[in-house]
Image (cartoon, coloured by chain):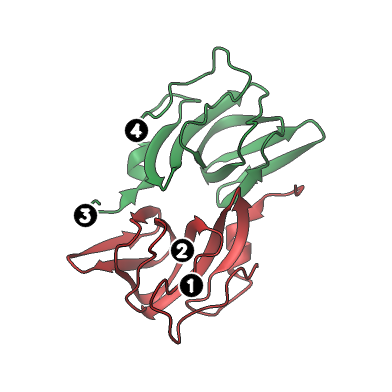
Chain colours: A red, B green
Amino acid sequence: MTNTAINLRNKLAAFSEHWSPRVVAEMNDYQFKLAKLQGEFVWHAHADTDEVFIVLDGAMTLEFRDKIVPLAAGEMYVVPKGVEHRPVAVQECCVMLVEPRGVVNTGDTGGAYTAPNDVWV
Amino acid sequence: MTNTAINLRNKLAAFSEHWSPRVVAEMNDYQFKLAKLQGEFVWHAHADTDEVFIVLDGAMTLEFRDKIVPLAAGEMYVVPKGVEHRPVAVQECCVMLVEPRGVVNTGDTGGAYTAPNDVWV
């Protein structure tokens, strides 16, 4: 139990890699992660869990097979479990992800964009 | 599964009561709630769960029996389960809370500040 708050801007300043989520906090068996997105991610789904995107800075879109949802800073979206999605950011976008500990960023798809899990910043 | 993002500023503009959390999203069995804080809340604990505070606007302090943690916009804190705490905001402060569905705002303490649960905005 720390003596100070977690400052999200300071945490974002501490890494620069895209598509590489960094854990900043845990609540029960869930993790809060920061990520910097730029470009087009891979289509994937998380079979066992919903996934929350909260945009902290910039803008992005969440592409689904049947629609596209734009998100700007101060907006959030819950991707339901099992639903294929693809995050896209034309310019760098900083987001907070909330999901259970152990969720892999590329879900069931894998591939080159798969980031190491449980990396803290 | 909605077609649009959840805009936190718009949601905050839709209610004015203090100490009365409003649900804006669910992820698995967890809820994301917005709340407006002003004044001194009651000392309480949540026996069964951690609780996350994310400050969206303004500033507040989380008082614990052995320390005080200041939080400003863009900062977050995880109150561990079972730990007594008291939120205090000198001026109005807007926060997002993340916790399992069913958590009562006054925890085990109860009393006049106990808000209806599962109220959406």
Helix, strand or loop for disc 1: strand
In this view, the residue in front, A65 or A93, is A65
Helix, strand or loop for disc 3: loop
Disc 2 versus disc 3: nearer the observer:
3
User: What residue lies at 39% left-to-right and 29% top-to-bottom?
Assistant: B118
Specify whether A88 is left or right of A52: left
- Residue A12 lies in what quarter of the image? bottom right
Q: Amino acid at mark 2?
A: Val
Do callouts 4 and 1 mark residues in contact (Cβ within 8 Å)? no
Q: Amino acid at mark 3?
A: Asn
Q: Amino acid at mark 4?
A: Trp
Query: Residue B3, which numbered label?
Result: 3
Specify whether B97 is left or right of A60: right
Same chain for marks 4 and 3? yes
Chain at tag 4: B
Mark 2–mark 4 distance (CA, rounded to whole Å): 24 Å
Helix, strand or loop for disc 4: loop
- The residue pinned by badge 1 equals A36
Q: Give the residue furthest to the top.
A: B112
Earlier residue among tags 4 and 3: 3
- Residue B47 lies in what quarter of the image? top right
Query: Residue A95, which numbered label?
Result: 2
Chain at tag 3: B
- The residue pinned by badge 4 equals B120
